[in-house]
Image: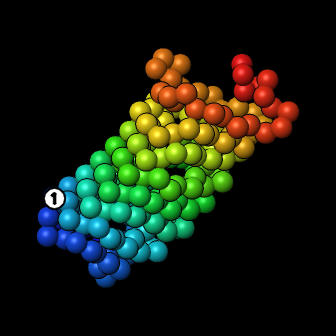
Amino acid sequence: TTIDTVFKGNDNIVAFNELRYFTGLTYIEAYAFRGCSSLWKIEIPRGVNTIKNGVFGDCISLSKIEIPSNVVSLGSGLCDGCTALTCAIIPNSITIIPVRTFDGCSSLKDVILPSVCTEIGSLAFYNCDALVSIDIPGAVTKIGSQAFDDCASLVSVTCYGVNPPILGSTSPGVFENDVIVYVPIGCRDAYRK
């Protein structure tokens, strides 16, 4: 079963929990709900294990996204441009936060990265102006360029890895602003390199 893009750009959808009626639905097609400007709430059924590119992009009224624990793969630009999004709940089944996942989510202030996350893609949190702090799980080995760039309120980053993650290009870098980076005791020299 697939929903294709029949709902894409539909301004009349406000809340959507009908996905549960799509029997056999294992993935949500790329851009399926993109531009549904009135959508503020959606329930993703437990049978879905893949959410493809840009599914909720530009859903400017969406305030919270909760990815079910059976989802193992997210596409890039999942919620890009969701300016009302304040909270994202990402399960421990997700190991990669793709490119531009929350790009332009200027109200996003509450996000907990999965402890098994190994990579944060380029521009993943670009222009998340309300984000004040972020915890980087110890499993993260790579952070893409500009992942947290243009986050005007970001003041602190806590890294839990004993080994620092490989950072994307150093110009313009991963963080635009001066942020305080907290690291595990005894790991300061490794992070300074």
Q: Secondary structure at mark 1?
A: loop
Residue 21, percent from left and from top: 31, 82
Q: Residue at x 46, y 20 (%)?
A: 172
Which of the two residues, 60 or 120, is positioned nearer the viewer here? 60
**Residue of label 1:** 9
Residue 90: x, y in percent? Answer: 52, 59
Q: Residue at x 43, y 47 (%)?
A: 130
- Please state which of residues 176 and 98 is positioned toward the viewer in this rendering: 176
Query: From what the image shows, is residue 90 above or below residue 148?
Result: below
Q: Is 22 above or below relative to 145?
A: below
Quick check: 184 left or right of 129? right
Q: Residue at x 56, y 62 (%)?
A: 91
Name the quarter where the C terminus is drawn. top right
Q: Quadrant of residue 100?
A: top left
Q: Amino acid at mark 1?
A: Gly
Going by the picture, which residue comes out furthest to the bottom? 21
Question: From what the image shows, is residue 30 above or below residue 4?
Answer: above
